[in-house]
Amino acid sequence: MVVFLSYILYCFYIGVLLVFLPWSALWDANGLVHQFPRLGELVLAGPARGTVSGLGVLLLVVGAVDAIRFIRHGGHEET
């Protein structure tokens, strides 16, 4: 039960990070962006940021579906 709840929290935490991080100043201040300019062009492009954010939304949906399934089954994860 604790492992499953940890998994759900992990999905939500990483999902929120992946949704908002690509659009923050922290993303632009990445050391690899400055060290490798071609990589920087790719990583700072809108489609790349959108893809990373899309993965975050996917993780949020997966976490929500699993949380709902967990609640519906009375706190017992499915096997």
Image (tube, helix red, strand yellow):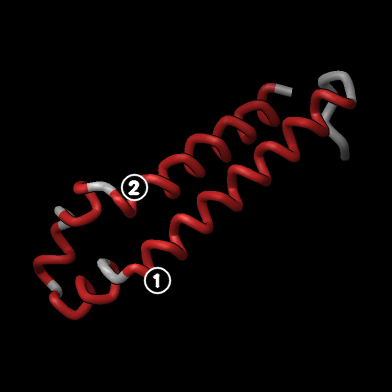
Residue found at x 56% / y 50%: 57
Which residue: 10% across, 69% down? Answer: 35
Work out whether residue 3 or residue 17 is closer to the camera in this orientation and state it: 17
Task: Identify the residue position indicated by label 2 in the image.
Answer: 21
For residue 20, above or below residue 29: above
Judge the density around disc 2: few (<14), some (14-19), many (≥20) Cα neighbours within 10 Å.
some
Q: Is residue 16 above or below residue 76?
A: below
Three-letter amino acid code at disc 2?
Leu
Q: Which mark is residue 10?
A: none
Q: Place residue 47 in its image quadrant.
A: bottom left
Q: Residue at x 87, y 19 (%)?
A: 74
Q: Kindly report the distance in space between the C-alpha atoms of the residues bearing marks 1 and 2.
A: 14 Å
| Residue 9 location, quadrant | top right
Q: Is residue 54 left or right of residue 62?
A: left
* Along the line of sight, the residue nearer the viewer: 5 or 48: 48
Report the side of 41 relative to 23 (left or right): left
Query: For the N terminus, which image quadrant?
Result: top right
What amino acid type should be assigned to the residue bearing mark 1?
Pro
SS of the residue at dot 2?
helix
Residue 78: percent from left, percent from top: 87, 36
Determine the secondary structure under disc 1.
Answer: helix
User: Residue 78 vs residue 8: left or right?
Assistant: right
Kindly give the residue lying farthest to the bottom in the view shown. Answer: 38
Residue 20 image offset from top left, x and y in percent: 38, 45
Residue 32 at x, y percent in the picture: 17, 64
Residue at image position (13%, 76%) is 37
Give the residue number, with chain letter if any, for mark 1: 47
Give whichever of 35, 43 is nearer the camera. Answer: 43
Which quadrant is home to the C terminus?
top right
